[in-house]
Image: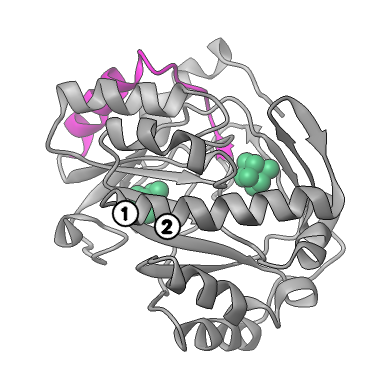
Amino acid sequence: MKNLHPCMGRVNNKGRIHLPVCPSCNMFCKFCDRRIDDGAERRPGMSRALVSPEDAPLRVAEALELCPEITVVGVAGPGDSLATDHACRAFRAIGKRFPNLIRCMSTNGLMLPEKIRDVAKAGINMLTVTVNAVDPVILNELNDGIVYHGELLTGEEAGLILIKNQLEGIRLAVDAGLVVKVNTVLVPEINGRHIGAVARAAMRRGASICNIIPLIPQQKLSHLSVPSCTEIDRARNEAERYIPVFRHCAHCRADAAGLLFGKDFGNDIYHARASETFSHG
Ligand code: SF4
Ligand code: SF4
């Protein structure tokens, strides 16, 4: 699988399509900005449109016509993959029509222990779990709370549940045979000295690789600065003491399509339908 995956195998001649099928999220990261836009910005969470699970195979067919090098179908937003059943439904539909494409899902991990069976049944091969801290006090600086079983939880209580579910979910996903990558948003002022602890916890649960993503200062963290190259290097080196580090993240949008560093076909596939969708803000 690795040599067919543009991100995991670092193969430049293979592509991916991200399907923006997730309408909502179940937590409030302080730096999150999910918007439906015109495609101008290249960063996670942004999408031109929201696609229904039923429509997903059609979008994949269109993408394959434009870019036959696509080997991976990913779901990475704009909301969370497990906050609704949209992502799993889309993956099941894609599996029926395109069984040979690698299925790659990103999640915040809150619902992972409860949904791991659905994830496995949807034929997901590779899972990314974003873990920004394994200490509830630090997490509280990055996250305003979670919605868990219909209840809004904040503070340490929310952090403890989120961390427990993320780590347990990683272990369950690894046991189910998925390749697990852990993403961590690096905010030097908040979790800069905590990256090793996150990497160690991920390694102990069986994750294969981690990805340190520099903060894009926005929303409630807009007053912070963009991590410097030195800070990013230091964090990656710290993580690498425990687990291999992925160093070529392209900060893909939730509706990216094509080769990782080539032309993006997202506009051709999604733009015309932007007005039929809604933003979950
Ligand atoms: Fe999967 Fe992330 Fe690569 Fe998309 S950018 S294909 S979600 S690893
Ligand atoms: Fe935004 Fe992802 Fe955090 Fe949800 S988990 S609030 S989509 S960054």
Q: Is residue 169 above or below residue 82?
A: below
Mark 2 neighbour class, 10 Å CA radius: few under 14, some 14 to 19, many 20 or more? many
Q: Is residue 193 left or right of residue 78?
A: right
Expressed as whole percent of the image width and height from the top left, the position of residue 42 reads 54, 50
Q: Which mark is residue 175?
A: 1
Q: Is residue 30 above or below residue 92?
A: below
Residue pictured at 71% horizontal, 47% vertical? 32
Expressed as whole percent of the image width and height from the top left, the position of residue 29 reads 73, 48
Distance from Cα at disc 2 to Cα at disc 1: 6 Å
* Whether label 2 touches label 1, CB < 8 Å: yes
Residue pictured at 37% horizontal, 30% vertical? 118
Q: Is residue 169 above or below residue 62?
A: below
Residue 252 visible within the image: yes
The amino acid at mark 2 is: Arg
Q: Is residue 134 magenta?
A: no
Q: Is residue 68 left or right of residue 19?
A: left
Q: Quadrant of residue 238?
A: bottom right
Q: Is residue 238 left or right of residue 140?
A: left
Disc 2: residue Cβ within 8 A of ligand 2's nearest atom: no
Count how many numbered circles sit on residues in the image.
2
Q: Mark 2 — residue?
A: 171
Residue pictured at 56% horizontal, 53% vertical? 166
Q: Is residue 176 left or right of residue 192?
A: left
Q: Which residues are magenta?
A: 46-67
Residue pictured at 12% horizontal, 37% vertical? 100
- Mark 2 lies on a secondary structure that is helix
Q: Quadrant of residue 142?
A: bottom right
Q: Which mark is residue 69?
A: none
Q: Is residue 102 above or below residue 234?
A: above
Expressed as whole percent of the image width and height from the top left, the position of residue 69 reads 16, 46
